[in-house]
Amino acid sequence: METSCPDPLRREAALKTTALAATLLFTHGQTTERTVIAAERLGRALGLTVRVLPYWGELTVEIEGTPISQIVPAKPLGVDMGRVLAVTTVIDQVCNDKLSHDAAEPALISAGRLPPASTPRFTLFAALGAASLGVIFGALDTTSLLLIAASAAIGALMRRWLSAVSTNPLIQPLCAAFVAGVVAAAAGRFQLSEATTLVAFCPCMVLVPGPHILNGAIDLARTRMALGPARLAYAAVIVLLICAGVLLGFAAVGVDLAVANSARPVPLVIDMVAAGCAVASFGTFFSMPWRLLPFPIVVGMFAHAVRWTLISAAGTSPATAALVSCMLVGIVVTPVADRLHLPFAALAFSAVVSMMPGFFLFNAAAGLVQLVSLGPGAPPMLLTGIAANGATAFLIVMAMTVGLILPRMLFERFSSTREQSQ
């Protein structure tokens, strides 16, 4: 393996290849730390000692000890496990002398062009995932589940169509949430379902940008103060647009979105099966290869069983149950994600997606709309409900984030210490 790259042309080609690999990993959901490690490892294999400096909007790859660098535009807007796996495979092949240096760039370009999950699969699993979340939150009648599935399927088709006509990633969740609001409002107007609020909420829950929240939290924990808040701000904007979309859908039909009652508990077996279906759907959203889907499904079902037991049998709060369950998921997923070269945030979030507090979040949004419409005549219980739902959603998100990233941080700390001692 080469250790130096004195020829200017070869050095420029090696720098370009390294920057391409870093960009593909960064923009398709890999954690920042793993992106940096993989790119620097590839640089060494190509004969360069490089530093990778990621920011929102660009990546800087510079050769240490020289003023030579390359700045490439890069925004971490998407999540694609298949492409991350393919790019990392190319890096491993180069580092293990199984792929020539000249063939590295074409191989990376091919990896970056891998197609996402097909539209039929994407649509089918969107419907399955939303309906599964409906089951978890207590919508057990057939009509409500069919409405939820149909709404999510229409939203998925719209998202795919919008991705082909616009590069703005914010339009997709807004329009899909609008569809969910229209379907739910129409169901309420024609009295097709008693769970109108869940018909609105469940298709919106599959739009929540969990991997961006986790990656942003990890960046903050690593004191990447420019990148972490930017990731979290992007996720927050998506959540706000989801809320706005569903509220606009109700307004378009002329129906008010009511605050939903607390979710009815479902039996453990049904809860676990529904959680597994939700995990499968999010694995599809993130273009996870079929052969890898069973792992997060099993982990997700186990985690949801733990959560169900803690809430139903032990009487713990949803936030505490989410913390314990997600910590177990983090312990299991962290070494597997590294071994399989998959983005940790996407894999971990897929396993715990059914725990996201979308029910409380959207309930708080519905309460705020009612508060504005009622004005000074709003009952005190409405304000109390808004505060309770908002606080519960915030605590659950924090508990899930800490539970998932703490094992990750400890594992990386242990791994780096072990490598230094060898």
Image (cartoon, rainbow, N blue to C red):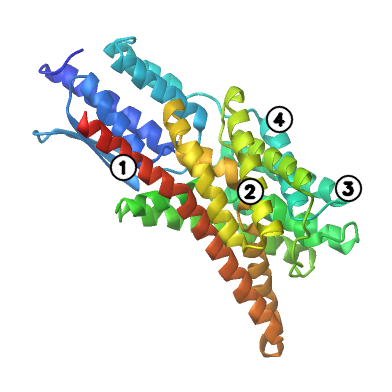
Three-letter amino acid code at disc 2?
Val
Q: Quadrant of residue 15?
A: top left
Q: Viewer-proximal residue, 349 or 69?
A: 349
Tell whether 337 sits left or right of 377: left
Q: Quadrant of residue 249?
A: bottom right
Crowdedness near tag 3: few (<14), some (14–19) or many (≥20) residues, C-alpha within 10 Å: few
Three-letter amino acid code at disc 3?
Thr
Question: Residue 68, can we see it?
Answer: yes
Tell whether 406 sits left or right of 253: left
Q: Viewer-proximal residue, 305 or 149?
A: 305
Marks 4 and 1, Cα distance to the nearest angstrom?
Answer: 42 Å
Marks 2 and 4, Cα distance to the nearest angstrom?
Answer: 33 Å
Q: Which residue is pictured at 59% across the width and 46% down the height?
A: 352
Task: Choose the circle earlier in sequence order: 2 or 1.
Answer: 2
| Comparing labels 2 and 3, the label whose residue is closer to the camera | 2
Q: Viewer-proximal residue, 163 or 334?
A: 334
